[in-house]
Amino acid sequence: MATVAKTEGIKAFSATHDWESADYEPTLPVSEMSNPLTRNIDRAPASSIVKMLQACDAQMFQEKSGAAYERLLSDQVAKSLMEVAKRVQLILKNPQDSLIVLSGCGTSGRLAFFITSGFNRELRRLNHSAVCSYIIAGGDRALFSSQEAPEDDPISGALSLKKVSEGKKRVLFIGISCGLSAPFVAGQLDFCLQHPDVYTPVLVGFNPAHQARNEPIPGCTFTFHSVVTKMRELAKMQKAFLINPVLGPEAISGSSRMKGGSATKILLEVVFSAAHAANFSRTPITYNGILQHMRSYGKVLDITYSQTEGIAAVMEAAGRSLQCGRRLCYLSWGFLGLLGLIDASECKPTFGADHKDIQGFVGGGCKELGNKEGDLNLMGAESGIAHIDFLHNVLPCLTDKDTVLLLYSHSDDVDEVAKLARRVREKTSNMHAVYHQTDGDTAAQQGEINKLCSSTLNFIWPQATPASMGLQHMWELSTKLVLNAVSTGAHILKGKVYQNYMIDLQVTNSKLYCRAARLLQRLSGHPKSLCEEALLKAIYQVDKLTEDIMTCNLTTHTHTARKVKKVVPLALVCLLTGYSIKEAQSHLEQKPIVREAVEACLREQTLFSGSL
Ligand code: S6P
């Protein structure tokens, strides 16, 4: 049964599926479309926001006969997963001179790290050599902070793959790009195609192949689309693999950290778990086994969203903090903590947030996480991610206006959780918790922690879980869903979303630049050329574009945009009102809530055009 049908309230939302029809936003790939379910998410109260997110997530597991696109549970997807799992198993069996590499940009790179670490940890526990490596565009710094520019660099993608696989005779390369769009990953896939004797390329993403990005990549003869086309040919002979189910548009248009990130985690965990079970417990890799494992992730959605009111309460608290310029901190232990770091780092490009708005802290910081480049603390305050950094930099100035969210599970050192919770409680009563436990297990200190917190999302998981799926994976996905909901909802409540568009996104790479230009077109109704002009004026803070600016390339534009705040709102106000950049800036200062500023301009424009 499709997960979506389970909850009564969800039925109302799932009535609209028109994004699947051919005439729905026909120029956009699914990953960039706006989801009809969330068109009014910007005006919804917290509990409705959670329900909309639930309905969007449930789209991942919908099974529709005759659907236009392949879905997570489609036949072809399950078959490809089986084949890739068999390749992983071969490497486990004969690890010498072999390597599996997972790579991606932004959230996709962070999940590459997350999944690689988990898989290697499990192998080491069994005294098996680690066979997996990760690459993230921009290096380890990008694991915990927003680094969007390296996504545009296909050469550095190819070189980093070459470097990590030096001397290997057999490499299974898994490139992740939710939108089938990142030039960094395209460069790596192209490199694999040029060295078929060593590399088998696998592409994970969430658009149909024909929607892969087809814009020219500066300095390259290939596009993402041309690489995918070659891979499709090779896939017929099982020399390359494409895993690209469609998940439905994201709740916030283009925010692939949400469903895209969750589906990446699900698909790759299914592959690695099946290979692991085949190698270590002689459980054959079967079609049914793969499907059953995938379906069990659907149950995680049900269990998580069964606590709608609890999630909404944390979202409201976090929203209040952001609204008054205060912060939300995730304090966590073990690997759930990495999800907190990931969630926090994504808010900068998505909502134009400051890195201090939402911050994640995990026990011993990098030491605990085992990233390649080790301790990143020297790279600036942004990278202070250990509890000690929290205690020194954040705790002293915490007040009731800040929100603190503890993330922990029964298998963490709950004594430590209680200790830190007591210290936080001395500074703020606005502390909440997400706690995972299995049925029947209770930690002695849990009662005390609950009393210290204003609310606790206590997830109790059944002991008898499907054998193939670790409890850890369930807790992780569930935590990811909660954090994505809280940070997205808090920014919506702060007015950072207009309808279901990120109105204050950062314009720091070519994908985000194109998205921003498209958004301006959509909201202003002006032609593309005028919108791009306004975008450039906002980026360079000028009222007239000089020859110099006009001849700069996209990389210079996106590099310059890093230093400017509220680029898109600024461009939009200029477009709608004809204000100069300075006037638009002062208008935005008077109306600091971006959504309200945009709405006021749109209203004025409608009145004006109505009076003509
Ligand atoms: C998306 C997130 C971005 C993307 C990155 C890679 O919510 O903010 O950092 O992960 O742009 O995208 P893709 O489509 O290549 O996985």
Image: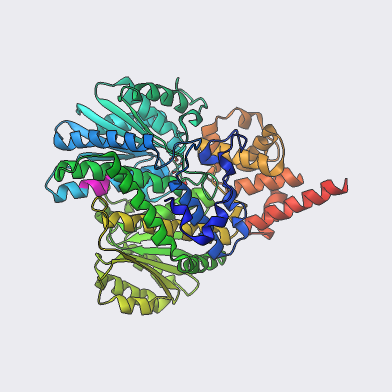
Which residue is found at the position 56% from the left and 62% from the top? 48
Location of residue 274 by image quarter: top left
The residue that appears at 64% across and 35% down in the rendered structure is 532
x and y percent of residue 24 in the render? Answer: 61, 38
288 or 191, nearer to the observer: 288
Q: Quadrant of ligand 1?
A: top left
Residues 105 and 259: in front is 259
The residue sitting at the left extreme is 127
Residue 524: within the magenta? no
Colour basis: rainbow
Q: Is residue 461 above or below residue 610?
A: below
Work out whether residue 111 can be spotted.
no
Identify the residue at horizontal 56%, vertical 54% (top origin).
13
Expressed as whole percent of the image width and height from the top left, the position of residue 324 reads: 56, 67
Q: Nearer the viewer, residue 422 or 440?
A: 440
Q: How many marks?
A: 0
The foreground one among 102 and 166 is 102
Locate residue 134: give its quadrant. top left
Q: Position of residue 476 (x, y in %)?
A: 33, 56
x, y percentage for residue 23?
62, 35
Q: Is residue 66 above or below residue 309?
A: above
Magenta residues, start to end: 116-120
Q: Which part of the image, by quadrant, shows the C terminus?
A: top right
Give the prevailing secondary structure in the magenta stretch.
Answer: helix
Q: In the visual, does 232 lie left or right of 411?
A: right
Give above or below for 338 relative to 153: below
Residue 89 in view in this figure: yes
Magenta segment includes 117: yes
Q: Residue furthest right?
A: 612
